[in-house]
Amino acid sequence: MYQARGQGIKSDPLCSAIFAPFGVNLAYRDTSLPGHLKNGHDKIPSDIADVVRECDPEAAVRSFERLVMPMIKDSMRAPLLQAVLVVLDEDKTIDTDSPLSWLRGYTKSAVLSASSIDLTYLLTSLVRFAILETDNNECADGVREIPDKYVSSFPKSAAPIELDEPGVIIKWPDGELNTAATRKYISDAEIRNDVDALKRMLCKYKKPDQLPVPPVVDKTEMVYVEALYAAYASAEDVPKYTRRDVDRNHRYKKDFTYQRKCYYATETIRRSLQDALLPIEYKEFDEMREEVKEGISPVLIPPYNNGYKRLTAVTSQAALVPITRSQIALLPGWIGAAEKVGMCHMLANKKEIQWVDEDDGTV
């Protein structure tokens, strides 16, 4: 790294910058320490090793990119990488399966077989490895064996090697790396391309046409419909409500029509997932039901004056519940307020919730 530094960058500031990402400040040390560390004269002080061992990996890599990478000439990055890989390959004291970093699978063999490497992450990892896993004194002879022009002896243009946009990703054209030593950073352009590809894929699955609401209540609806009748009866303080009673009450008739429409909106989704060969497993419908159930629980549990008030409070809450765990939410336009309200009636059909509670009327 000293050989690859930019013009005007001295050894001491480079050494200080290399340690800084790990939380080590050499400014308060003996001024001879950087030089002694570089030539293998001194061991790494134990207190420095302790700080490096406890550092945050992500923060260290980010700081290394900010503090150290600008000190390396752009034209020397590919030669530096080649030189580092040769040194790593020839160092028989490091086993091929030795982990070189925090990243699982980032072993010596994985690095040497990589077809693309994040130079920042590799250098950060090797510095940390050198501090914690090697005896600096024992490296003195090896350092002396490396010629002063060692890095520059590797081709600067190194065509087929190329540098990516940030100037830190170095790639070969012979295929993508399929080990854990792959690139650690994803460019904004790659993220945009992936998002656009995902949108194109999901747009193929348009929201199905909603099932019509039959004028006569189907037998599969009877559990949640009876729960609605009980809520209306609770509000009117009568023992029982029927469909005829609902039709006579303008407010309940409108509500009943709305609730059934929401039920069929959700039933449309359920049947579509069940019948179509979509890349989303049917269990995602169950996941959505659990999300709605969790979201409405704080509103469902408290006592109310009557069941109808609980019904209106809970369904209003359901319409606002964000669906984040279920992959159904990824399908554009599939899940709206009606589908989430309808899920309440799916829960009522399974007798997991009810609108009338024995504690009602106590508030």
Image (spheres, rainbow, N blue to C red):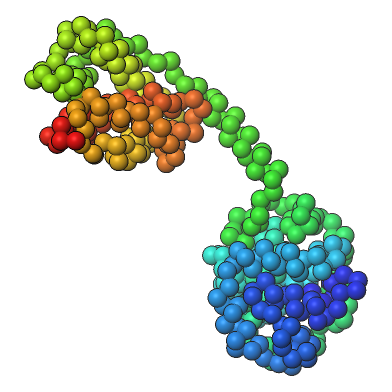
- Quadrant of the rendering where the N terminus is positioned: bottom right
- Quadrant of the rendering where the C terminus is positioned: top left
Where is residue 294 shown, x and y percent of the image? Answer: 32, 41
Q: Residue at x 64, y 75 (%)?
A: 23
Residue in front for this viewpoint, 205 or 294: 294
Residue in front for this viewpoint, 120 or 62: 62
Q: Residue at x 85, y 66 (%)?
A: 73
User: Horizontally, is 179 left or right of 326 in the view?
Assistant: right
User: Horizontally, is 340 left or right of 29 in the view?
Assistant: left
Vertical placement of residue 143 versus 275, above or below? below
Where is residue 15 shown, x and y percent of the image? Answer: 76, 79
User: Horizontally, is 88 left or right of 299 in the view?
Assistant: right
Residue in front for this viewpoint, 324 or 117: 324
Where is residue 278 shown, x and y percent of the image? Answer: 44, 29
Vertical placement of residue 275 versus 27, above or below? above
Q: Does residue 16 show up?
A: yes
Residue furthest to the front = 363
Q: Does residue 106 show up?
A: no
Q: Residue at x 22, y 14 (%)?
A: 218
User: Horizontally, is 297 left or right of 4 in the view?
Assistant: left
In the rendered image, which quarter is residue 90 located in?
bottom right
In the rendered image, which quarter is residue 108 located in?
bottom right
Where is residue 102 shown, x and y percent of the image? Answer: 56, 68
In the rendered image, which quarter is residue 117 located in?
bottom right
Vertical placement of residue 263 versus 179, above or below? above
Q: Residue at x 26, y 36 (%)?
A: 300
